Structure formats: C-alpha cells, structure tokens
Image (spheres, grey):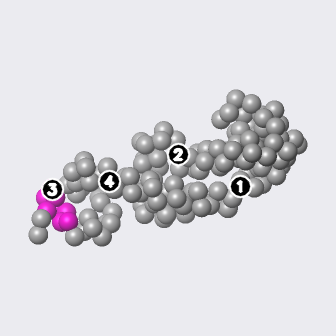
Amino acid sequence: MQTIGASIDLARVDQGCVFHADEKVGPHLQAASAARRLDALERYMRAKLCAPVALADLAHAAGTSVRSLNILCNRHHGVSPMELLRNLRLDAAHAQLAARPETSVAELALTFGFGHPGRFAGYYKLRFGQLPKHAGAFW
C-alpha cells in the first residue's frame, strides 16, 4: 500500500480521517483537506442562514474540532467561524435589501438570524459603511 509521509496510508486519506499534528502529511493533502472542510462549512452556513447555529454545529459540519475550525477560518478567511457566518448573513440581507428596498430593518434582522435589530444595524454599518435604513430599509 502506498504511504504518505511515515504514518498515513492512502486508504485512511480516502476515508476522510482527521489528521493529527504528529502525523506526516504533505502540503497538497493539507490544502485539499482544508478546501473540502471549507466547502462543507460554507454549504452548511448557506443552508442555515436563517436558523440558530452554534460553533459546535459548524465544527461538526466541517468534520473537525472547534479549535481546528477556528484555525482554519482564521487562516483562510481572516475571521472566526461565527464572524464568517455573520458576514454571509449580512451579505444575504444586503442582497435582499437591494432587491426589496421596502423591507424593514427588523424583518431583515429576524429573517437572517439576528435577534436584535439594533445590533444587526450596527454590524451592517461596519460591513457596508451605512445603516440599512439608508440603503433602503425602514425601521
């Protein structure tokens, strides 16, 4: 059987096993594994834009630990997994607001998983440089 490094065989790679820091893995396999995990994470996040999601749920969807997920998201996106989810939700709210400017801020906030319209408006302003009410939504 072919081996990678000193201790991982291809059968284990094909099964999607989680690698440990002490195992020898080539950079191409690390990148492929990271890409698969990030793709799974993004699919899960997009499916759950409007639902409550915990960090543990995100880690499970990506097939990794919470700690590894934090490292992966920071390395590839420069933000934590929860910030990544928030940004995806804000982007979706921004797109909906562009398509339906009559949407209220409260409706946008609740639709995309923000429990507090004021906090949603603050995050929106940080991301897009203006409050949602100035982008077309009303309170």
Amino acid at pointer 2? Ser
In the image: residue 67, left or right of residue 137: left
Amino acid type at image mark 3: Gly
Measuring 53% from the left and 50% from the top, which residue is drawn there? Answer: 81
Task: Residue 65: give x, y in percent of width and height.
Answer: 43, 60
The answer to whether one can see residue 128 in this image is: yes
> Looking at the picture, how far across and down is residue 101, in whole percent?
81, 42
Residue 5, disc: 3
Q: Nearer the viewer, residue 98 or 22?
A: 98
Label 2, label 1: how far apart the Cα atoms are: 17 Å
Residue at the far right: name it. Answer: 139
Q: Residue at x 52, y 41 (%)?
A: 79
Q: Is the residue under label 3 in contact with that under label 1 (CB below 8 Å)?
A: no
Q: Quadrant of the N terminus?
A: bottom left
Instruction: State the residue in front, 136 or 78.
Output: 136
The question of residue 8 being in magenta is answered with yes
- Front position among marks 2 and 1: 1
* Residue 119, visible in the rendered structure: no
Helix, strand or loop under label 3: loop
Where is the C terminus found, in terms of image quarters?
A: top right
Residue at the (77%, 54%) spot, across then down: 110
Residue 32, numbered circle: 4
| Residue bearing mark 1 | 113
Crowd class of label 4 (few under 14; some 14 to 19; many from 20; radius 10 Å) = few
Q: Marks 1/4: CA distance?
A: 31 Å
Highlighted magenta segment, given as a residue range: 3-10
Helix, strand or loop at mark 4: helix
**Lateral position of residue 24 relative to residue 133, left or right:** left
Locate residue 67, reporting x and y percent.
Answer: 44, 53
Residue 110 in the magenta stretch? The answer is no
28 in relation to 1, above or below = above
